Image: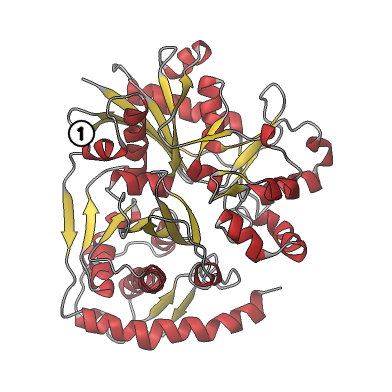
């Protein structure tokens, strides 16, 4: 039996999966809540030591009784932390969704061209990026600046604790706003803005590159023998896409967990006006020869869980019923709990429930929320089709929230195309495990790594009766509502 371990450091939980490369399936898992603190009402931080200990416990639990041939990591992006000369953390990890650095974004755009930044990085500046967090930290804690020897993203920090090496992959580097996409190196102009130099950042290598073996000092907390090969992994959405077969130009991926992302895989880095203007990002894929266009919505599954908590005792059987009688004349959601995301990126937008009357039930409102997420996805796929010229014959849907049966039915019918659901549990962690298999030489290529997966795929076909109903609600309800309410919301919440 040959096993590799994949870690997924997520917004709400940390997971470890042990993947048997011969069976092509997970044989053991472990999970812990992602530790987080809220020092102020809008602030969210992760204590580095607590995070490391949760990761170590997950590794130990998932690998108990098995030999591990290699380890790799999938993780949320943008979040990172400063280290001193001895590798000690100087400040807690600021969560990727923590908005405290918005003033630094505004100041950056006052002094520098958004167009130039986008041409270099493929990203539209926002508070999530590492550059913004660094600028916030230096401004608010100037005494720390002199002590910063390194800045590392979260998965880089975990690999540093495991191996002593400071490395990152292209996908994580891309989410710092410090990386030159066309040259695939750290960008000197962007580093000058942050007053950093390349010696303070990890070496950038392709996903799946072995960067060292585990240290003796971590054997007790992880149960991994010293010298176990560790490979850099990638951004969680991309690792999930990789495991699910998203490795060819023209493939579209819908990834929905705590947040939602939509991706179109391409074979070149091409920054055109439409991409930037609509808020899409363009950066290197797990396969370093490919790129992707990516859009996002900051809230997905998080809103579903909020709804279920706020409106208890939903009749699941009734809620999953989908026919003309339960969709027509029912309310509509604009699911913009933290801004509208792509394609117009209005951060001041809020969620709107429209058309509610006294006869509507909790189940009606629940279905409308799912429908709102599907409408958001359709608008983004239509925009990406126009930009890329590629029309998908299918959409690969991954992520925990996409396992919702009602959401599957609605998305397929709203998109009017088959929805392909790989039955891979923990796809992002499995993607990391596949990169570990590639890194330690079990397979010789990325293509061979993907072929290790033996899980079946489920195909959700659109409901022909529901397609025109959803299309009408999308064209005559969702789109005009979004457009008309954006200006109003900006006036109300923009300051």
Q: Residue at x 54, y 83 (%)?
A: 485
| Color theme of the render | secondary structure
**Disc 1 residue crowd, few under 14, some 14–19, many 20+, Cα 10 Å:** some
Q: Quadrant of residue 479?
A: bottom left
On screen, residue 214 versus residue 68, left or right, reads right
Q: Secondary structure at mark 1?
A: loop
The image position of residue 384, as x and y in percent, is 40, 69
Viewer-nearest residue: 229 or 139: 229
Viewer-nearest residue: 345 or 99: 345
The image position of residue 301, as x and y in percent, is 40, 57
Q: Residue at x 30, y 16 (%)?
A: 67
For mark 1, what is the residue? 24
Q: Residue at x 40, y 44 (%)?
A: 286
Q: Is residue 216 among what the camera can see? A: yes
Q: Is residue 359 among what the camera can see? A: no
The image position of residue 331, as x and y in percent, is 37, 81
On screen, residue 261 versus residue 253, left or right, reads right
Q: Is residue 402 above or below residue 494?
A: above
The image position of residue 182, as x and y in percent, is 53, 51
Q: If the image is split into quadrants, where does the N terminus sit? A: top left
Q: If the image is split into quadrants, where does the C terminus sit? A: bottom right
Q: Is residue 270 above or below residue 435?
A: below
Q: Is residue 117 above or below residue 441?
A: below
């Amino acid at each position: 039996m040959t096993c590799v371990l994949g870690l997924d450091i997520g917004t709400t939980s940390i997971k470890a999966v042990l993947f048997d490369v011969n069976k092509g399936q997970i044989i053991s898992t472990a999970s812990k809540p992602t530790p987080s603190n809220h020092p102020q009402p809008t602030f969210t931080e992760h204590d580095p030591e607590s995070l490391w200990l949760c990761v170590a416990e997950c590794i130990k639990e998932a690998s108990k009784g098995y030999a591990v041939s290699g380890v790799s990591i999938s993780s949320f992006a943008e979040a990172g932390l400063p280290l001193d000369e001895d590798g000690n953390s100087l400040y807690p990890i600021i969560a990727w969704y923590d908005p405290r650095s918005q003033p630094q974004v505004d100041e950056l755009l006052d002094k520098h061209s958004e167009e130039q930044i986008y041409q270099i990085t493929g990203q539209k500046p926002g508070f999530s990026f590492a550059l913004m967090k660094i600028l916030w930290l230096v401004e608010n804690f100037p005494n720390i600046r002199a002590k910063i020897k390194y800045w590392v993203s979260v998965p880089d920090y975990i690999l540093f604790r495991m191996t002593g090496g400071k490395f990152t992959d292209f996908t994580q580097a891309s989410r710092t706003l410090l990386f030159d996409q066309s040259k695939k190196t750290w960008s000197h102009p962007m580093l000058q803005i942050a007053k950093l130099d390349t010696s303070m950042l990890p070496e950038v290598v392709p996903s799946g590159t072995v960067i060292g073996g585990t240290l003796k000092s971590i054997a007790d907390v992880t149960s991994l023998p010293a010298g176990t090969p560790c490979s850099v992994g990638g951004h969680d959405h991309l690792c999930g896409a990789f495991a699910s077969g998203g490795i060819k130009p023209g493939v579209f991926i819908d990834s929905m967990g705590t947040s939602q992302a939509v991706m179109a895989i391409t074979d070149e880095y091409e920054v055109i006006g439409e991409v930037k203007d609509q808020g899409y990002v363009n950066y290197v894929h797990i396969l370093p020869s490919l790129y992707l266009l990516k859009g996002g919505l900051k809230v997905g599954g998080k809103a579903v869980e909020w709804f279920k908590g706020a409106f208890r005792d939903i009749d699941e059987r009734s809620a999953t019923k989908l026919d003309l009688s339960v969709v027509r004349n029912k309310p509509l959601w604009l699911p913009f709990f933290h801004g509208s995301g792509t394609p117009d990126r209005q951060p001041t937008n809020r969620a709107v429930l429209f058309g509610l009357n006294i006869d509507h039930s909790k189940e009606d409102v629940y279905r409308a929320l799912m429908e709102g997420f599907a409408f958001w996805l359709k608008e983004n796929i239509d925009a990406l089709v126009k930009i890329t010229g590629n029309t998908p014959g299918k959409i690969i849907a991954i992520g925990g929230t996409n396992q919702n049966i009602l959401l599957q039915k609605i998305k397929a019918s709203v998109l009017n195309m088959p929805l392909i659901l790989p039955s891979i549990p923990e796809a992002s962690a499995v993607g990391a495990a596949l990169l570990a298999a590639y890194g330690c030489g079990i397979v010789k290529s990325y293509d061979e790594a993907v072929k290790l997966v033996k899980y079946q795929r489920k195909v959700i076909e659109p409901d022909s009766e529901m397609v025109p109903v959803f299309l009408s609600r999308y064209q005559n309800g969702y789109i005009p509502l979004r457009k008309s309410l954006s200006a109003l919301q900006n006036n109300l919440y923009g300051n």
